[in-house]
Amino acid sequence: MQTADQTRKNVYIIQANPVYGETEKTVYIPYAAGCIAAFAWADERVKANFRLGRFIYTREDVGTAAASLDAPALAAFSCSVWNMEYNKALAQKIKKLYPSCIILFGGHHVSPDASNLADFEYVDVLVHGGGEEAFRDVLLAVAGYMPWGDIPNISYRSPGGGTVTNLKKQRDTNDYPSPYLEGYFDDILQDGIRFSAIIETNRGCPNNCAFCDWGDLKTKVKLFPLDKIERELNWIAEKKIEYIYCGDANFGLFERDSKITDLIVKLKNEKGFPQRFRVNIAKNITATVEDIIGKFYANSLDKSLPLSYQSLSPAALNNIGRKNMDLNHFKELMALYNRTGVSTSSELILGLPGETCGSFCEGICTLLECGQHKSINVYACELLPNSRLGDPLYQKKHGIQSVRLPFYQIHCPIPDSAAEIQEYSEFVVATATMSREEWVQAAIFSFTVLALHNIGPTRAVAMYLRHERGVAYLEFYTQLLQFFKHTPGTIVNKVYENLADLTAGVSEGRHAWVFALEEFGNLTWGFEELAFLELVKNIDAFYREMGRFLERYRLGEMKEPLLRYQRELVKLPFETKRRIESDYDFPAYFENIYRGAYAPLAERKSILLIHNDRAAETWEDYAREIVWLGRRDDAALYSGGRYAREVGYKDQTAG
């Protein structure tokens, strides 16, 4: 006689997450898999009929993973851009080994209609949108408790042939069982891996940006109970998990988010965890948001707080349905945060419909003009299947052209091409308002500004020319890029040619948006990061060539001390201290500009002593510590707050 446990059918959930880092590897807990499991097994009928097998949460070998399953009745896959091809390969293998196993695909990268069923003959069910209720209902249908046609938000294969897509419906649930508190991750925490956590305090988004695959969630935001959030945060702290990513679309949208922040601060101060809490901050800066930002900074909870724009082009913003923060307010905030030491970052997306090459380059430099000198991130526009940009009719309307590129996460290990399943993404490389050639020009310009100004080796020079000679940042970097382009045989020309080749390669579909060089470790890097590293490796030649470029500005006797100060600000490997002397008070001058309190440069001797106890001993260490982990701390320049600095004047000796 069979026991109840023997009659239950086995179900497996696969959420293959990326592995970050090379030596000290980090993986996110499979939060989505845990959420749908916790909701489904809260139903007594599911408990009586199904047994949950182990989570597959990394990219295990496909053959080994499939063979490890025990007579699976259903295998559910959480699909994202970073695991879709892996999921397809594993699903095919499972279907071959277990033909009767139902294969279910859900997640952001599932088609919004039944088209994936036509494309992937081994997939039986698609879940559209939020997965908890639909996954539970599919299990109930398999067990015979409800007809398939009554399950909202799914597509499935009809027994009579063809496919069926049921009606889409907004679910009213505003709370779900916690996979953390219900013990769904207790087993994997014993696997000897360093985990990061994801938490939601609410679900939904009031915005509807065309590039975002959260767009269909435009609805009233559902708030999760505060007591559940508090217990989850305590669980994470007790498990000594260092890093939390908050899955809210707009943290800070509600006053209660300040209370949640207070709880996180308390846990960090009392238990030491979490050490970092990364959020998508609400784009409208309210008193609540400013309160949260201040607490994050005071307690080192977030290295850099996002103040994002995506575009500054009115035409592009209209096309994507987005409104931005007022630039005057942004400028005031940048001055405030620079005064208080709060690091911020701003994002732009290259390739949005309505953007031109000129408007995009101008947008980058507008952020510089407003005081965002340290951290701008430029992302390629991707066509996500559940975004409005992913709609073929939208693409036709705006003349969108895309290429299918290999997809790699930045700063992740380079996969073994012989063994690894390659992921892909659709990148926009032309629109009705930006040709492919103009897209390449805009990309090269953006990488140049990010490498030289944001990371820092020309920032001080550009800021001086802006404030003393009225040379706009757009003018300076446009001229500098032309100098790079038209001075053959120089290190700057070599860097330009590399950027041009890499960027053209993206536009032609030849290689990914990131690249790798063995000397900087077995990791992927942004193009601007590689450009910076190449220049710093040849720092003396680079500044000699910069001296040639600066001749056009007729700086006279100021050119040499300004350029020397800029060069000595750049952090190099192997250094534990540095002494920077000048006949001008450059430290105070640039600090005043950051703070939005410009004052003329004083001609008085300054001595700046730098103490650094984190010297990189190899270029690989330097790339990791300064360019990757330290970038948001402005670590490439000694003017940043990462290093102990002492300033003396006239005949005084600093320190």
Image (cartoon, rainbow, N blue to C red):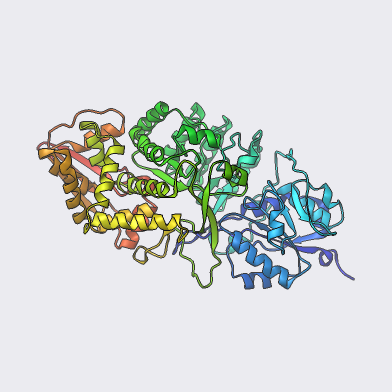
Quadrant containing the N terminus in the rendered view = bottom right
Image coords of residue 214 (percent x, y): 60, 42
Q: Is residue 88 visible?
A: yes
In the depicted structure, whether residue 326 falls above or below residue 610 = above
Counting labels gives: 0
Q: Residue at x 77, y 46 (%)?
A: 152
Q: Residue at x 37, y 66 (%)?
A: 518
Q: Would you identify the image quadrant in which residue 92 lies? A: bottom right
Image coords of residue 238 (percent x, y): 56, 50
Q: Is residue 529 left or right of residue 95?
A: left
In the depicted structure, whether residue 122 falls above or below residue 277 = below
In the depicted structure, whether residue 116 falls above or below residue 335 = below
In the image shown, does 447 or 604 lie closer to the viewer? 447
In the depicted structure, whether residue 177 falls above or below residue 125 = above
Q: Is residue 41 visible?
A: no
Q: Would you identify the image quadrant in which residue 260 lies? A: top right
Q: Residue furthest right?
A: 1
Image coords of residue 398 (percent x, y): 54, 41
Quadrant containing the C terminus in the rendered view = top left
Q: Is residue 320 left or right of residue 97?
A: left
Q: Residue at x 26, y 45 (%)?
A: 480
In the image shown, does 265 or 73 lie closer to the viewer? 73
Image coords of residue 640 (percent x, y): 30, 43
